[in-house]
Image: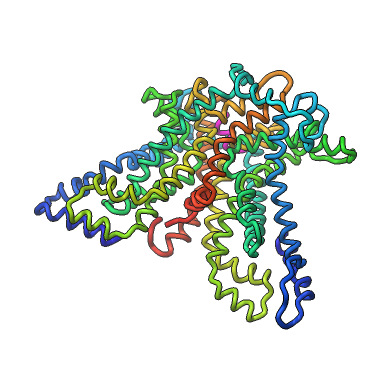
């Protein structure tokens, strides 16, 4: 609705400012002004929380109680950041976010490596070594990725308990590997399918087998897609909350769970500066990846949307 | 792709006349071994766990899943529990609003970004960065902004607008809009990126033809370009829709279901009954209802996308 309103608003305006014949192109046409105003308005909506988060984290509590979330801190202090990292309380312990950060690192690195490796092999097998039923498995995998995780949660608890890994880092890593599989397999399958099949045939004629072709021909050619998968997995696993809270066990809670506990289950008067410092710290890893990777991140999120 | 299959089959034939066992089981053996993790995940998790959940939702399992078969009792109880009914109503209300606004704003922003503007990549960076953040971070930031005393409302009142009201997070009738603002903040950029990719995929000739015919730009977008983007639109709806059904982290971080039960959602109901309510059967029945919801969305889509052309995903 809203876009039709703005569009109809611009149409007559452009019509009146455009006489016939060749026209000069001034930069500030009414149309341009409306476009940029709208974009700037939305940009403020997107940037406002980041600004508030950072500004609040540098303030002292008395200044926050003064009640102006727009104001810059009168005196920049890192106390809240130090407290958030080392001594903020979660309801159970008062060790800050640092243990959560390291747990997230211990979860993210192996999960990312294992899930990407398995998915790359899956994609390769699905494209170049199809066997009876391989497409059926793939179809179920893709369909399964739309089923809510709540459906699998309890049986997976039982399975991991039977395997003796429930409440450990291994359980979270296994679960991330399983649920990362559909999207990653899809991405790798599409990528390998786009490579010229002659390369594979030539290697087969030369007598190379499944693994040799994979490691010596396919992998060296698929660096870009590995980077895309890496970005997707690191941000996705770092941001996970549900699997961490269910499978990791209290000792191994990832950063998101610790953060939520610090803010939402701590007793006593809430310290908003500490809360916001903790929030920024938790968001920092995916944000750095986002800003460093730039267009590759866009490619990653779009890759999941393009079905092959 | 078909000729690769032929090529590999020829490869297998080289090794001699294959017997039945060789043709079925041993054919492509390394590939099958390599695909064991995928096959295990599909059979054990995606199929096995789903069947397990549906089966045990018909039992009276409480602390352990050992209960006896009770038919539809759990479902009757589910739909007579006000918390579940509130959760479902909330999900539908939030879902419809979220879908409409995400698509609407996403499309509007994509159209604006498509007007050969300056600083396009800067605008895109700004719009998409929330998508890189977790729902927990999103929820907590907005919880702070919407804090009635010290957040935006308090600030505006201190600055002189004493009637300024932005207490959605504490107001049972407005709390879903609070969720919506946070949810849109996180997801609109992604929708914009998808839509922009769709817009850029439209042939330049279409635009020239429309211009020659004197059709105004906005009309071209609505009547010609939008219908041509059907594929992108369907993808966006499916992705946003399946995200909405899973809505959990954002609620936990922003409102934790409150005030009262006014922002409860089904995923949270499932979690609470399974892991803190000690009533597994009830949680499984709720999970099964979530599965049914997704099937209702997915089956028509899968039929439209793949059924008509007679090929699989």
Name, please, the residue furthest toward the top. Answer: A93
Task: Name the residue located 23 percent from the left edge and 58 percent from the top edge.
Answer: A201
For residue B262, say whether it is visible: no
Residue A106 to residue A132: above or below = above
- Taking B178 as reference, is B131 left or right? left
The secondary structure that most of the magenta stretch takes on is helix
For this rendering, which residue is in front, B267 or A128? A128
Residue B197 inside the magenta-drawn segment:
no
**Residue B272 is covered by the magenta coloring:** yes
Left or right: A119 as drawn, with respect to A282: left
Give the quadrant of residue A257: top right
* Quadrant placement of the C terminus of chain B: bottom left
Evaluate whether residue B258 shows in this view: yes
Name the residue located 49 percent from the left edge and 36 percent from the top edge.
A237
Q: Is residue B50 above or below residue B104?
A: above
Residue A158 placement (x, y as % from top left)? 42, 27
Q: Give the range drawn in magenta.
A: B265-273
Quarter holding the N terminus of chain B?
bottom left
Residue B301 placed where, x, y %?
50, 56
- Residue B269's spot in the image, x, y percent? 59, 33
Q: Which quadrant of the structure image shows residue A23?
A: bottom right
* Residue A57 falls left or right of residue B279: right
């Amino acid at each position: 609705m809203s876009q039709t309103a703005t569009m109809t608003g611009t149409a007559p305006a452009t019509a009146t400012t455009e006489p016939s014949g060749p026209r000069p192109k001034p930069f500030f046409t009414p149309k341009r002004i409306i476009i940029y105003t709208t974009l700037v308005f939305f940009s403020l909506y997107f940037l406002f929380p980041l600004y508030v988060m950072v500004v609040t984290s540098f303030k002292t509590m008395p200044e926050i109680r003064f009640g102006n979330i727009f104001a810059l801190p009168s005196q920049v202090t890192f106390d809240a950041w130090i407290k958030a990292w080392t001594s903020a309380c979660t309801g159970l312990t008062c060790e800050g976010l640092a243990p959560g950060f390291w747990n997230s690192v211990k979860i993210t690195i192996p999960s990312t490596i294992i899930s990407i490796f398995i998915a790359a092999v899956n994609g390769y097998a699905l494209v170049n070594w199809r066997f009876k039923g391989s497409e059926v498995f793939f179809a179920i995998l893709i369909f399964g990725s739309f089923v809510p995780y709540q459906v699998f949660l309890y049986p997976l608890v039982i399975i991991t308990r039977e395997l003796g890994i429930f409440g450990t880092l291994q359980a979270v890593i296994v679960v991330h590997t399983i649920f990362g599989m559909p999207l990653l397999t899809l991405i790798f399958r599409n990528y390998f399918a786009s490579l010229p099949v002659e390369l594979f045939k030539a290697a087969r004629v030369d007598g190379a087998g499944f693994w040799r072709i994979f490691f010596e021909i396919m992998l060296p050619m698929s660096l870009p897609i590995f980077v895309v998968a890496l970005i997707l997995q690191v941000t996705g696993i770092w941001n996970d909350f549900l699997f961490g809270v269910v499978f990791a066990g209290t000792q191994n809670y990832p950063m998101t769970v610790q953060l939520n506990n610090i803010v939402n289950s701590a007793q006593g008067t809430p310290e908003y500066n500490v809360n916001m410092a903790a929030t920024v710290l938790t968001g920092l890893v995916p944000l750095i990846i986002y800003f460093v990777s730039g267009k590759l991140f866009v490619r990653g999120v779009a890759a999941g949307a393009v079905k092959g | 792709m078909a000729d690769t299959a032929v090529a590999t089959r020829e490869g297998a034939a080289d090794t001699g006349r294959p017997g039945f066992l060789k043709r079925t089981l041993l054919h492509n053996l390394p590939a099958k071994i390599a695909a064991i993790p995928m096959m295990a995940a599909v059979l054990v998790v995606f199929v096995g766990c789903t069947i397990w959940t549906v089966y045990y939702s018909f039992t009276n399992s409480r602390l352990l899943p050992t209960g006896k078969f009770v038919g539809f009792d759990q479902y009757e109880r589910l739909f007579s529990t006000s918390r579940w009914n509130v959760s479902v109503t909330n999900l539908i209300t939030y879902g419809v609003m979220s879908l409409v606004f995400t698509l609407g704003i996403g499309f509007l922003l994509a159209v604006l970004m498509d007007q050969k503007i300056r600083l396009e990549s800067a605008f895109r960076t700004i719009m998409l960065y929330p998508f890189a953040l977790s729902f927990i971070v999103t929820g907590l930031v907005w919880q702070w902004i919407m804090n009635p005393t010290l957040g935006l409302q308090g600030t505006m009142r201190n600055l002189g607008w004493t009637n300024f009201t932005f207490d959605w997070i504490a107001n049972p009738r407005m709390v879903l809009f609070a969720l919506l603002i946070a949810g849109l903040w996180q997801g609109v950029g992604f929708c914009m990126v998808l839509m922009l990719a769709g817009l850029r995929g439209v042939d330049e000739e279409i635009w020239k033809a429309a211009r020659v015919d004197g059709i105004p730009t906005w009309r071209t977008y609505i009547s010609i370009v939008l219908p041509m983007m059907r594929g992108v639109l369907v993808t966006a709806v499916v992705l946003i829709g399946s995200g909405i059904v899973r809505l959990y982290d954002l609620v936990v971080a922003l409102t934790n279901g409150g005030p009262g039960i006014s922002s409860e959602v089904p995923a949270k109901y499932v979690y609470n009954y399974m892991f803190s309510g000690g009533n597994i059967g009830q949680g499984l029945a709720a999970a099964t209802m979530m599965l049914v919801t997704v099937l209702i969305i997915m089956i028509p889509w899968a039929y439209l996308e793949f059924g008509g052309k007679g090929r699989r995903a």
